[in-house]
Amino acid sequence: MTDWSEKYEMVVGLEVHVQLKTRSKAFCGCSADFGAPPNVNTCPVCLALPGALPVLNAEAVRLAVRAAIALECTVNLTSVFARKNYFYPDLPKGYQISQYDQPLAVQGTLHARIPGEKETRPIAITRLHMEEDAGKSIHDRYAHMTAIDLNRAGVPLIEIVSEPDMRSAAEAGAYLRTLKQILEYADVSDVSMEEGSLRVDANVSARVRGAKEFGTKTEVKNVNSFSAVERSLQSEFERQCAMLERGETVRQETMLWDAAHGTVRPARSKEESHDYRYFPDPDLPPLILDADYVERLRRTLPELPQKRRERFSAHFKLTEPELDAVTAEPRLAEYFEGVARAHGDASQAAKWVMGELAAALNETGARITDFPVRAAQLAELLDMIRDGKLSHTAAKSVFATMRTSGKSAPVVAAEMSVTQVGDDTQLEQWINDVFAELPDEAARFRAGEKKLTGVLVGAVMKKSKGRADPRKVNALLGKYSS
Amino acid sequence: MQNIIDAVGECVGRATDARFGPDGLNIVVATNRDASLACANEVALAYGGGATMSLPGVAVAVKDNIATLDMPTTCGSRILAGYTSPYEATAITRLRAHGAVVVAKTNMDEFAMGSSTETSVYGPTHNPVDPDRSPGGSSGGSAAAVAAGITTIALGSETGGSVRQPAAFCGVVGVKPSYGRVSRFGLVAFGSSLDQIGVCARTVREGAIATYAMSGRDPYDSTSADVPVPPTPPAVEAYRGQTLAGMTIGIPSEYFPESLDPDVRARCDVAIEVLRGLGAKIIDVSLPHTELAIPVYYVIAPAEASSNLARFDGVRYGPRAADTPDLRAMYDATRSRGFGPEVQRRIMIGTYVLSHGYYDAYYRKAQAVRALIARDFATVFASGVNALFTPTTPTPAFKLGAVTDPYEMYMSDIFTVTANLAGIPAISLPIGRVAGLPVGGQFMARHFDEPTMFHVAAALEAALGEEAHA
């Protein structure tokens, strides 16, 4: 594949839809839960029965404002809900309640963290507005028919629109990962692309490097992971570059990402261009926020990733990769902090969180909040290692048992009889037993063949069923070598 | 208690009388005897148990665009054929809590779009005063139900005069409450920023009682206002001999144009003299933007309607055109067959004025002018005017089929649309007859000043006495 990046520059702007984690929908009392049987979470309002009216969910407003603050936006104290009119079977009212010329928030900044780079990159956010989700059309369930599930209709969303500030697929990926992280820390959404609580539309264009004007953009849709966003952008960029190189003009259109083939293809072109006929929704008064309310939300905003990273860096003296890992998710960071504070050795805590803990979570798919070994219990385990009561190997098996039993480290270690032995008399006994069993090696070792230390330590460990403190065995063995 | 059940039974009997059905005056489009009697029974029990009710056992007819549980709600449209709402309008729930019993759904212009009750899929309603004439519209069925004596109270809906104009044509009282006074939850939306449920009644007091029974903030309607519900006005008799001393009533010149029917003008002049005689100070005022009201209304109302009626798409309820090759064709066929010509016309107008490139020229400008119209009223009321008096309509009831030009039909709302645009309360009451046809006089008052409006209207009603119907 040709590398176009020498000659052309990619320009990307992102529109991200994020589902707010409210209990009920944006404009009615129906549950906003994901996964209920079709059309169970519906009522006259979200079914758009004749005469039904929307009433704004205050919790959705709270979460949207919180997200806006987390993204350093200016929150408009007056914003207006507007109707976006179009016909589609999963849009019950024939319009979507959204915000148009007076959005909830404008002019934010996201500091994208690019892996391996120390400095973050500021990406301007144009606007953040509230809207409701549509239902789902299910085309593959019944032959020659489309089924409609309106459980999702009316679920609250925010749409976050960036400026075309990104210049590579990697930057777009960094923007999205940072955005997800911030929204997770702000505790406003589950931000799961798999469950559809975060959806990305990317606007991408190509221009000759150094050019001032943007090229014609296309919109890439149907992307269901961050890495797919990066791949689809690269693929679309290359398609556009090749067209420009041939002297063709890029058409403004919607492209769909085909994950199976790793390519983009044009969406079936619409018969008509959409005119959404936006106008202020007469059923909903303008949303007026009190300045004190916004300030209170600003003051009570949870610690955001960048802040937490700086605090951990100052307090715990971790390496950059360790900081990346332990601050990746807010709950994980809290867990790490719990372990580090209780145990004292942050570096050791980070190693366990990134190693054994991450592996365990990965293996079971459990979330850290549901993990049976709590931070204080892991800290206790690490204390035992530090105090020579458990070998590293034994600690791993104790940890594995703690995961299933929920018991504390000392209890598990005692039950498994794996508590490390550091008692000289017992260790001398095992060493002498080993010497007796391996007379040849013992003789050579005594004669000064130091490289046999490892073999002998191993034999002592085996004899002790892993309980001997290897550092002490090593030290004791030294006496016998001339 | 048996009185209540018997009284409701009698009303159900009248509602189901063939004289008022499709082969008669075509006032009633649906009834449900069992449900009405069951409801009457519940009311009788509660009332007998000591419950406080302002309308105990009062039978009510309800316009076909207000959601009721036991009878269809079809908005006089084919597109809602057979549709019964699974929930009830807040206004109905509140009326029922006050002891009212729904006995009938009444005919209306399709989706309340019309001023003659001729655009209904059920065919036109005939005016009980003169069956050759229109009862007005769009709440023609409700005004006719009261005029014909089927019920004493009937609910209508107002977007631009749809209660007051038919009330005037049928010789009954028509109330349009302030915007926000009565919950719109369950009223099938036409022009959401203009719509209010209103009341047709025999007397001002009965109109007031029914209005207040429905009033108050509703958590299901974000546009309903949190203002206290005023006390029920005293009986009409209390107004006999009462004066309107200290009250200033404005007569806006724009509502008495050269073209005004001379008989209507004469009736209004009599009423004004009666008001003066009651001690009210009568002053000439001006509402200079009045002539823009109809054009503004016919931008805003269709714009909102074009969006409000998008939900009638054949997907979830109502008949669906099944013989179509694809989705787009299904929408086209369902809506083309389901909506009548007037509704289609307004959807087209509304879609046009909201379209990209036209929004500023039409919708935005109309909203700006609407603000000027509201300011005209605010200025007049701020100058010390307590209420305004005008004719309700430029002419008495016209003959069925006589008005065929849509624009001419739209002009019959010329004196009523302003109150909807400004959100203020207004009432029409009979002020006499011309060649046997009723003439309506209208009072308008400050936003949420229904007490003053009912007060002056009741005083005039009492002073006119039998003359109001002569």
Image (cartoon, coloured by chain):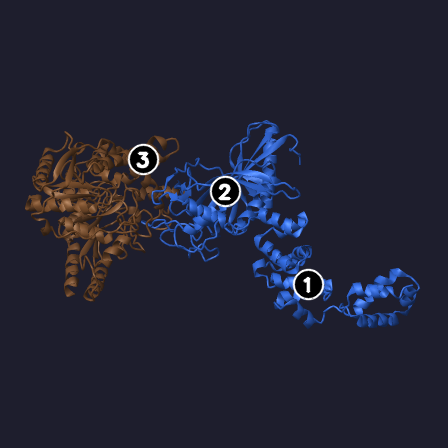
Chain colours: A blue, B brown
Does any portion of residue A155 appear in the rendered image? no
Residue identifier under label 2 = A160
Q: Quadrant of residue A394?
A: bottom right
Q: Residues within 10 Å of mark 2 (few under 14, many from 20)?
A: many
Q: Kindly identify which chain the residue marked by label 2 belongs to.
A: A
Q: Are marks 1 and 3 in contact (CB under 8 Å)?
A: no
Residue B54 placement (x, y as % from top left) = 19, 57
Q: Quadrant of residue B92?
A: bottom left
Question: Marks 1 and 3: which is nearer the front?
Answer: 1
Closer-to-camera residue (A419/A81): A419
Secondary structure under the numbered disc 1 in the rendered image: helix
Residue B446 placement (x, y as % from top left) = 22, 42
Q: Kindly identify which chain the residue marked by label 3 belongs to.
A: B
Q: Which quadrant of the figure contains the N terminus of chain A?
A: top right
Closer-to-camera residue (A59/A268): A59
Residue B101 placement (x, y as % from top left) = 21, 58
Three-letter amino acid code at disc 1?
Asp
Q: Which quadrant of the figure contains the C terminus of chain A?
A: bottom right
Tell me the distance, in whole angstroms, between the alpha carbons under discs 1 and 3. Answer: 72 Å
Secondary structure under the numbered disc 3 in the rendered image: helix
Three-letter amino acid code at disc 3?
Gln
Does any portion of residue A468 appear in the rendered image? yes
Closer-to-camera residue (B303/A107): A107
Is circle 3 on the same chain as circle 2? no
Tell me the distance, in whole angstroms, between the alpha carbons under discs 3 and 2. Answer: 30 Å
Q: Are marks 2 and 1 in contact (CB under 8 Å)?
A: no
In the rendered view, tell whether residue A35 sits above or below residue A295.
below
In the rendered view, tell whether residue B136 sits above or below residue B21.
above
Residue identifier under label 1 = A383
Residue identifier under label 3 = B367
Q: Are marks 3 and 2 in contact (CB under 8 Å)?
A: no
